Image (cartoon, grey):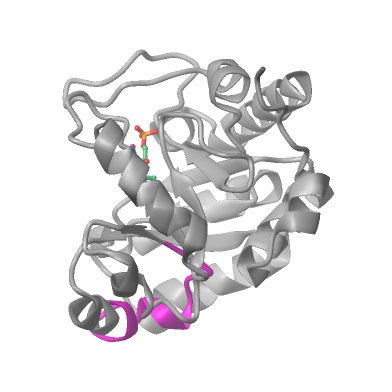
Amino acid sequence: KEEKRLSYEQKLSKCDHSVGKKLLEIAVEKQSNLIASADVTTTKELLELAEKVGPHIVALKTHIDIISDFDSDKTILPLKDLATKYNFLLMEDRKFGDIGNTQELQYRGGTYKISHWADLVTSHVIAGYQSLDCFMNSGVIAILSMSSKGALTDNNYRTEALKIVETHPNIVGCVAQNKVPENVLLFTPGVNLADKGDAKGQQYNTPEHVFKNLHTDFVIVGRGIYKSDDAEKSAKLYKLESWNAYLKSL
Ligand code: 6AU
């Protein structure tokens, strides 16, 4: 028999990572399970997008290394202020994938000093359990499988990766295109209401599909929001569609 999906309130009582708890609390409070992916390339665009979508999201996902004019004071400080103003978390989609020592240097230092500001970071688990030990200041969202055509994250990889996801104390949940046990928070990108994919291998599903079939907890939407004519209106639409899809899946 199918495992029944748990509500955010039920997951909150089972979650023992402080950042995971915070995310679930925001979801309940804002009635949103939407994460906007801010794949824009300037500080101005990033802050404008955050201002528009902020009221509707639980987290803003960044690729901070694509910001051409990155500056800690001018990019991160105002972004953190917006996160506080609208009550959303910052998720840096760094997709770490190296040995622990290198990841620690990438996480704490360099230009971006991710550990100083990111509530959540994405990381592959390909380098093994201990490689995740370095992420002390953020919750980790592990990459279990990918949305693009031909991704190498096959069944065997996912089974082994899931063992790490279920046991590592720094891990809050995972990114996947497949169902995971109810004790793991599931984040699903590759969500778009209008398109089926792009010319570079991306594949899309609807919020309805991922909540019903995968029991997703949070959807991640990039171009569906930031490329639309009205990002605020789109964020609101994705929020409502995804929240209703969640309620229907209970
Ligand atoms: O909605 P899009 O296609 O414009 O953007 C999707 C966003 C991008 C990707 O880097 C990211 O989601 N992503 C990820 C993440 C979140 O880790 C994994 C994956 O399998 N597919 C994917 O698109 O910022």
**Residue 168 in sight here:** yes
User: In the displayed structure, would residue 135 be above or below residue 87?
Assistant: below
Quarter assignment of residue 196: top left
Q: Residue at x 36, y 80 (%)?
A: 134
User: In the displayed structure, would residue 51 be above or below residue 202?
Assistant: below
The quarter of the image holding the N terminus is: top right
Q: Residue furthest front?
A: 1
In the displayed structure image, the side of residue 45 where residue 18 appears, left or right: right
Q: Is residue 115 magenta?
A: yes
Q: Nearer the viewer, residue 173 or 207?
A: 173
In the displayed structure image, the side of residue 56 where residue 62 appears, left or right: left
Q: Where does residue 24 sit, x and y in percent of width and height?
A: 72, 53
User: In the displayed structure, would residue 125 be above or below residue 209?
Assistant: below
In the displayed structure image, the side of residue 26 where residue 179 appears, left or right: left
Q: Where does residue 46 sit, x and y in percent of width and height?
A: 43, 56
Q: Residue at x 75, y 37 (%)?
A: 6
* Picture quadrant of ligand 1: top left
Q: Residue at x 69, y 59 (%)?
A: 15
Q: Residue at x 60, y 47 (%)?
A: 52
Quarter assignment of residue 197: top left
Q: Nearer the viewer, residue 18 or 88?
A: 18
The quarter of the image holding the C terminus is: top right
Q: Nearer the viewer, residue 229 or 35?
A: 35
**Residue 45 in sight here:** no
Q: How many numbered circles does the render carry?
A: 0
Q: Where does residue 222 sit, x and y in percent of width and height?
A: 42, 37
User: In the displayed structure, would residue 22 be above or below residue 230?
Assistant: below
Q: Where does residue 69 sit, x and y in percent of width and height?
A: 26, 68
Range covered by the magenta-colored residues: 107-121
Q: Is residue 139 magenta?
A: no
Quarter assignment of residue 113: bottom left
